């Protein structure tokens, strides 16, 4: 029984050594494929003979493979614009890298891989999040244009320009610039907007509601003009933060 148990320990260490080579050579998928065998080898060892060294080796391998899997997961989340867990995921990856730096032996290539991906996906997350916010604002302006709401479309367009500046902090955004110019041209041609608005309202069967909306626009017209004037002034002075605060107040 004792000899059999020692053979199982030997097999466990042999598999650990094999996965170490795979990780060192950046063959992470192959290392993951071998993990089940490593775990089975560990489970086959009698509990009384599972030393701290055995457990530490298994824990070390777990951390290494989890880091790789979390990096794959964060790529999928960003690609699917599922931003709610990204901050938490980045912090977890940062913690894993820190733990790997403390262990012996250090998986140097994996640590470098993790640090590179941490920076890369951190930047990608910021860019994609800002683009997502831009596109949501863009869709709101399109809706206002379809309804013929010139005042609202113009006001939202100023907000869209601010959001475009946020995106440009991270580099060129030609695709978003095209959308920005598309909206600019539509707003500068109010007759086109008015025509679209007529089509929109004529398709509705609630004329009473339409009149209420028109009346509300007349009442608020002066306020909107004043706010737009103030926003233009702030933007000319390059006072982006106060311009944003004014938008939020509206």
Image (spheres, grey):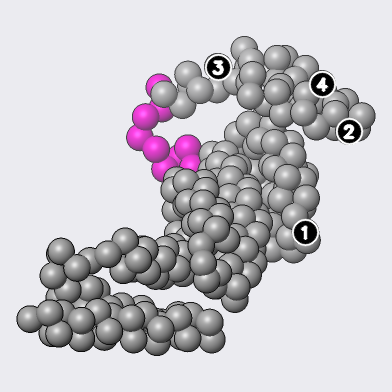
Going from N to C along the chain, the mark reached first, 2 or 1, is 1
The x and y percentages for residue 190 are: 72, 41
Is residue 26 a member of the stretch shown in magenta? no
Point 17% across, 73% down: residue: 45
Query: In front: 166, or 70?
Result: 70
Going from N to C along the chain, the mark reached first, 3 or 4, is 3
Residue behind mark 4: 230
Query: Dot 2: within a 10 Å radius of its alpha carbon, few (fewer than 14), some, or many (20 or more) residues?
Result: few
Going from N to C along the chain, the mark reached first, 1 or 4, is 1
Residue behind mark 2: 238
Which quarter of the rendering shows the C terminus?
top right
Instruction: State how far apart marks 2 and 1 are (Cα).
Output: 19 Å
Residue 5 shows in the view: yes
Left or right of residue 40, residue 58 in this image? right
Instruction: Give yes or no for contact between labels 1 and 3 (Cβ–Cβ under 8 Å).
Output: no
Instruction: State how far apart marks 2 and 4 are (Cα).
Output: 12 Å
Instruction: State how far apart marks 1 and 4 are (Cα).
Output: 28 Å
- For the stretch drawn in magenta, the main secondary structure is helix
Instruction: Give yes or no for contact between labels 2 and 1 (Cβ–Cβ under 8 Å).
Output: no
Residue behind mark 3: 215
Instruction: State how far apart marks 2 and 3 are (Cα).
Output: 35 Å
Query: In front: 174, or 91?
Result: 91
Mark nearest the camera among 1 and 3 is 1
Give the residue at the far front of this rendering: 2
Mark nearest the camera among 2 and 3 is 2
Point 22% across, 73% down: residue: 42
What is the secondary structure assignment of the residue under circle 1?
Answer: loop
């Amino acid at each position: 029984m004792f000899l059999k148990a020692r053979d199982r320990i030997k097999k466990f260490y042999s598999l650990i050594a094999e996965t170490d080579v795979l990780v060192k050579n950046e063959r992470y998928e192959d290392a993951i494929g071998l993990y089940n065998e490593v775990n089975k080898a560990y489970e086959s060892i009698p509990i009384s003979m599972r030393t701290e060294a055995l457990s530490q080796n298994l824990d070390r391998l777990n951390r290494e493979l989890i880091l790789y899997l979390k990096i794959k997961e964060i790529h999928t989340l960003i690609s699917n614009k599922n931003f709610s867990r990204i901050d938490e995921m980045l912090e977890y990856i940062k913690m894993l890298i820190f733990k790997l730096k403390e262990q012996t032996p250090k998986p140097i290539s994996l640590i470098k891989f993790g640090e590179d991906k941490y920076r890369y996906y951190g930047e990608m997350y910021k860019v994609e999040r800002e683009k997502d916010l831009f596109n949501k604002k863009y869709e709101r302006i399109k809706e206002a244009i379809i309804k013929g709401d010139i005042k609202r479309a113009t006001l939202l367009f100023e907000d869209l320009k601010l959001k475009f500046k946020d995106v440009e902090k991270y580099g060129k955004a030609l695709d978003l610039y095209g959308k920005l110019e598309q909206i600019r041209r539509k707003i500068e041609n109010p007759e086109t907007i008015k025509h679209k608005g007529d089509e929109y309202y004529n398709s509705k069967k609630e004329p009473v509601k339409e009149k209420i909306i028109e009346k509300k626009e007349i009442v608020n017209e002066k306020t909107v003009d004043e706010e737009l004037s103030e926003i233009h002034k702030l933007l000319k002075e390059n006072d982006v933060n106060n311009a944003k605060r004014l938008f939020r107040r509206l």
